[in-house]
Image (cartoon, helix red, strand yellow):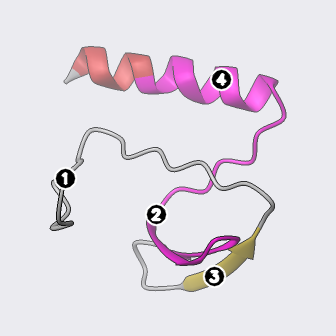
Amino acid sequence: TREIVRLNGVYKRLLANSGVTLLEGKGKIVDPHQVEVAQNDGTKTMYSAKYILIGTGSRASRVPISGK
């Protein structure tokens, strides 16, 4: 756990130093250019961008998509 926490800190610093806006929360892709992000307190915010990068973190799960 300590190593994952350390690596997460390294990745966050690299992203911040590259000008990336990091949005933490549970994301839901709405369409090819919009994502809804829910925070732990239940607040939901819509974001739109030309490109959306999905970082699953250490809690990835298999999505029930045929042909996965």
Q: Which residue is mark 2?
A: 25
Q: Which of the 4 image quarters holds residue 16?
A: top right
**From what the image shows, is residue 30 above or below residue 1?**
below
Spatial CA span between label 4 and label 2: 18 Å
Cα separation between marks 3 and 4: 24 Å
The residue under the point 35% across, 41% down is 57
Tag 4: residue type? Arg
Kindly report the distance in space between the C-alpha atoms of the residues bearing marks 3 and 2. 10 Å
Q: Which residue is mark 4?
A: 13
Q: Is residue 49 left or right of residue 46?
A: right
Q: Nearer the viewer, residue 52 or 16?
A: 52
Q: Circle 3: is it few (<14), some (14-19), or many (20+) Cα within 10 Å?
A: few
| Label 3 vs 1, first from the N-terminus | 3
Q: Amino acid at mark 2?
A: Gly
SS type, badge 1? loop
Label 2 element class: loop
Q: Which residue is mark 1?
A: 68
Residues drawn in magenta: 8-37
Q: Earlier in the sequence, mark 1 or mark 2?
A: 2
User: In this rendering, would 35 be left or right of 67?
Assistant: right
Q: Position of residue 26 (x, y in %)?
A: 41, 67
> Which of pointers 4 and 1 indicates the residue nearer the eye?
1
Which residue carries the number 3 mark? 45
